[in-house]
């Protein structure tokens, strides 16, 4: 069971435009309205991949019935912590001419301190029966920037075996790291802004990321690079890859799908490069779908067959030789990935 936390859920309203022009009227086509929020997206992606999950979320009472209907239809377990107010709406305007999404997100309703306390109690209750808990996304007003740190401490107190995955930025992320996090998944912009570094190449990213992974004792640090693919390290070894080739229809939920794919690979006990492969292939399947429609097992299986140019970073001959052997095993594994997934 993988539990996800969504303190600040939303409705994602996806609009499509042929070519955005700031000086003219732009006509849009409404594609979809989806219940979202990063944790809910991770659970939806996990459900699509056949991994047992539970979404723990704040439910704003003006929209609680709508949230219940949507999540019940998705078919995975969920638990709501109710709060007065309404869900925020996040507008995603997809410019087809450049395959780019403009995001306009509301702040949403604030919450009382008691809502945070109930979320912490629920995390402590669920941690012993969860293999991983993901903490991701923005926080509603009323929960301080140290809330994810408090979540980490609550989970650690309840279970030493449960992995903690964080997908946040700036002070929320830096404070969470103080409690002992296992897995981080920022994108490159969040990485640079949070850790106050300017990386102009993947080689420079490799140097900074290894230092951070070792400094905070991370099991995995994965940085998504958009159209350039993704990078992963455990501090000792590191890999990068390009994204699978797909027709991009939306970028919503891409990072959340990376987390879902990585969690699936960790559940299977796979190697670091395979964890990266599962993450980017899950994301690739998600971005090939309109709106916040996330990956499926069949869709990811097809992308696992692609050559995504997995490449290792190493510092000496012995490491290069070891990683060469690992790459050979990884290449052989990819040939049989589809068959193994079918068996599952």
Image (spheres, helix red, strand yellow):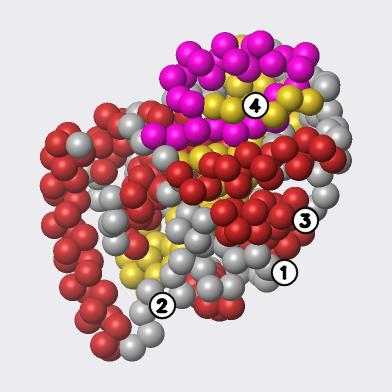
Query: Mark 2 and mark 1: span between their CA atoms?
Result: 22 Å
Q: What secondary structure is found at the residue carrying circle 3?
A: loop
Write the residue at 69% across / 39% down.
119
Residue corresponding to mark 1 = 196
84 with respect to 167 (left or right): right
Query: Mark 1 and mark 3: span between their CA atoms?
Result: 19 Å
Report if residue 297 lies within the magenta region: no
336 with respect to 262 (left or right): left
Q: Residues within 10 Å of mark 1 (few under 14, many from 20)?
A: few
The quadrant where residue 274 appears: bottom left
Please provide percent x and percent y for residue 101.
Answer: 62, 33
Please provide percent x and percent y for residue 330.
Answer: 21, 60
Mark 1 or mark 3, whichever is nearer to me: 3
Residue corresponding to mark 4 = 80
In magenta, the rendered stretch is 52-77
Q: Earlier in the sequence, mark 2 or mark 1?
A: 1
- State which quarter of the image contains the N terminus: top left
Vertical placement of 110 versus 127: above or below? above
Write the residue at 68% across / 68% down.
178
Residue corresponding to mark 2 = 236
Write the residue at 66% across / 11% down.
65
Q: Residues within 10 Å of mark 2 (few under 14, many from 20)?
A: few
Vertical placement of 7 versus 278: above or below? above
| Along the line of sight, the residue nearer the viewer: 163 or 12 | 163
């Amino acid at each position: 069971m993988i539990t996800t936390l969504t303190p600040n859920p939303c409705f994602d309203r996806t609009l499509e435009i042929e070519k955005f022009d700031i000086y003219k009227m732009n006509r849009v086509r409404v594609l979809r309205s989806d219940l979202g929020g990063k944790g809910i997206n991770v659970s939806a992606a996990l459900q699509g991949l056949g991994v047992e999950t539970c979404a723990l979320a704040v439910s704003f009472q003006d929209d609680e019935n709508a949230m219940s209907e949507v999540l019940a239809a998705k078919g995975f377990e969920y638990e709501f912590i109710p709060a007065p107010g309404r869900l925020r709406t996040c507008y995603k305007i997809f410019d087809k001419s450049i395959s780019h999404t403009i995001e306009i997100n509301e702040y949403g309703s604030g919450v009382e301190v008691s809502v945070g306390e109930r979320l912490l109690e629920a995390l402590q209750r669920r941690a012993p029966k969860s293999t991983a808990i993901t903490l991701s996304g923005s926080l509603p007003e009323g929960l301080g920037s140290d809330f994810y740190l408090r979540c980490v401490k609550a989970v650690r107190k309840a279970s030493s075996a449960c992995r903690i995955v964080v997908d946040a930025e700036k002070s929320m992320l830096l404070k969470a790291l103080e409690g002992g996090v296992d897995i981080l998944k920022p994108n490159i912009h969040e990485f640079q802004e949070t850790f106050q570094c300017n990386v102009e190449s993947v080689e420079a990213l490799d140097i900074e990321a290894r230092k951070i992974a070792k400094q905070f004792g991370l099991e995995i640090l994965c940085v998504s690079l958009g159209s350039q693919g993704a990078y992963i390290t455990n501090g000792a070894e590191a890999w990068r890859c390009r994204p699978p080739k797909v027709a991009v229809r939306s970028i919503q939920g891409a990072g959340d799908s990376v987390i879902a794919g990585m969690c699936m690979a960790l559940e299977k006990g796979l190697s670091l490069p395979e964890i990266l492969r599962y993450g980017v292939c899950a994301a690739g399947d998600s971005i090939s779908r309109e709106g916040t429609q996330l990956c499926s097992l069949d869709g990811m299986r097809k992308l696992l067959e692609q050559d995504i140019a997995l490449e290792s970073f190493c510092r000496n001959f012995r490491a290069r030789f070891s990683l060469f052997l690992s790459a050979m095993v990884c290449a052989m594994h990819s040939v049989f990935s589809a068959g193994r997934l079918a068996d599952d």
